[in-house]
Image (spheres, rainbow, N blue to C red):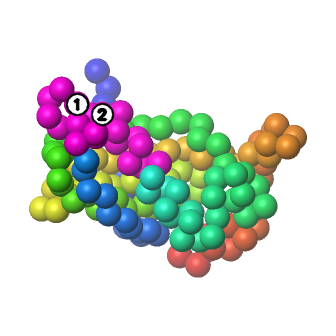
Amino acid sequence: MKRVKIKFPEKTYFSTDYIVAVSDLNYGNHVGNDRFLSFCHEARIRFFKSLDQDELNFYESSLIMADAELSYKAQSFHGDKLSIEISVQPNSKNSFDLLYRITNQDSTLVLLARTGMVYFNYKENKIDSCPEAWAKFLSQF
């Protein structure tokens, strides 16, 4: 079986913390695999909010998630303090990837993930191009 391989770049654009709640646990008493995508979503929303943006109002465009990959590296448990780092990789004029690295309070790598984001015009229901202000932001790094 082919395994997902995600390489997290050196440049981190944003970091946030999350404390694992009891509602994040599954029957194995560790964080359920489905919760990690939610952790990435929460971090993504916080990242965009730090830029005064959101997924529906993203530099005069919008965003839609096209795909996701997750690579589990270690278990996480109730009360763990997770650090979620985000990096950005432009793909084309229509999309970019967000990469996530989640570590616990002991700096143990817990998860690597990638979400493919596409610029989207909901009013016209079609793919959009990279907003100029976002391209300018990315060019600073």
Specify whether residue 92 is in view.
no
Residue name at image x 28 percent, y 40 percent: 24
* Outermost residue, right side: 124
Residue 137 percent across, percent down from the top left: 63, 73
Residue name at image x 44 percent, y 57 percent: 43
Compute the Cα span from label 1 to label 2: 8 Å
- Residue 28 falls left or right of residue 8: left
Image quarter hosting the N terminus: top left
Q: Does the magenta stretch include residue 37?
A: yes
Which residue lies under the disc numbered 1? 26
Residue 117 percent across, percent down from the top left: 60, 47
Identify whether 82 is placed above or below 26: below
Q: Nearer the viewer, mark 1 or mark 2?
A: 1
**Marks 1,2: beta carbons within 8 A:** yes
- 40 or 27, nearer to the observer: 27
- 58 or 119, nearer to the observer: 58
Specify the segment rendered in magenta. Answer: 22-41
Tell which circle, 1 or 2, labels the residue nearer the N-terminal end: 1
- Residue 83 falls left or right of residue 10: left
Residue 19 percent across, percent down from the top left: 26, 56
Q: Which secondary structure, mark 2?
A: helix
Identify whether 64 is placed above or below 91: above
- Residue 126 falls left or right of residue 83: right
Q: Which amino acid, mark 2?
A: Asn
Q: Which secondary structure, mark 1?
A: loop
Residue name at image x 32 percent, y 26 percent: 2
* Outermost residue, front side: 22
Which residue lies under the disc numbered 2? 33
